[in-house]
Image (cartoon, helix red, strand yellow):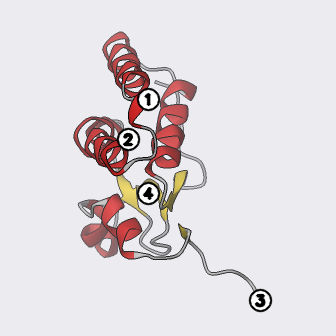
Amino acid sequence: MKKFIINRFKLISRLDRDIGVLIDNCLGFLYSIDLGHDLRKETGRIESVLYDMVYLGRTPAGCEFKEKLFRTRILPLMKGLAPAGYYFGIDPENTGLLGYWLKSDADAGFMSHDPLAGAEKSQSAPVGPPAAG
């Protein structure tokens, strides 16, 4: 696998309310690195499942399906790719960002945090850094 940590972190996605964007960003990252055969195969299976559910669209059932897919298949895969000394999760300094972060004692609470829970609490469009101004 290629080294993908840059400047002590690798941002994967903002925690947008749209689960489809989060999934696309994670899959885009997976396709951008040199995965072993088994991980490439699993990524292809995930992509295939997404194509098969396209008829659900942006319905509540479609969103629920995508959230379950993210939690049960994509999130464990992303966490499993974390290099030694890093974790995949929410940035401890900006809870609107998801990626690979350097472990420290201060990060312990964020390492197991569910990325979708923070996005569900917000009523605004994206969950992320406050707008300048």
Of mark 1 and mark 4, the one earlier in the sequence is 1
Of mark 1 and mark 2, the one earlier in the sequence is 1
Q: Which residue is mark 3?
A: 133
Res. 101 mark: 4
Of mark 1 and mark 3, the one earlier in the sequence is 1
Which is closer to the viewer, label 3 or label 4? 3
Which is closer to the viewer, label 1 or label 4? 1
Q: CA distance from mark 3 to mark 4?
A: 28 Å
Res. 54 mark: 1
Which is closer to the viewer, label 1 or label 2? 1
Q: Residues within 10 Å of mark 1 (few under 14, many from 20)?
A: few
Residue 67: percent from left, percent from top: 31, 48
Q: CA distance from mark 1 to mark 3?
A: 39 Å
Q: Quadrant of the C terminus?
A: bottom right
Image point 32% across, 19% down: which residue? 42
Q: Does 43 sit left or right of 29 as displayed? A: left
Image point 44% across, 29% down: which residue? 54
**Tag 3: amino acid:** Gly
Query: Can you say whether 108 is above or below 74 in the image?
Result: below
Q: CA distance from mark 1 to mark 2?
A: 33 Å
Residue 93: percent from left, percent from top: 48, 75
Of mark 3 and mark 4, the one earlier in the sequence is 4
Q: Quadrant of residue 110?
A: bottom left
Q: Does 13 sit left or right of 59 as displayed? A: right
Image point 42% across, 30% down: which residue? 55
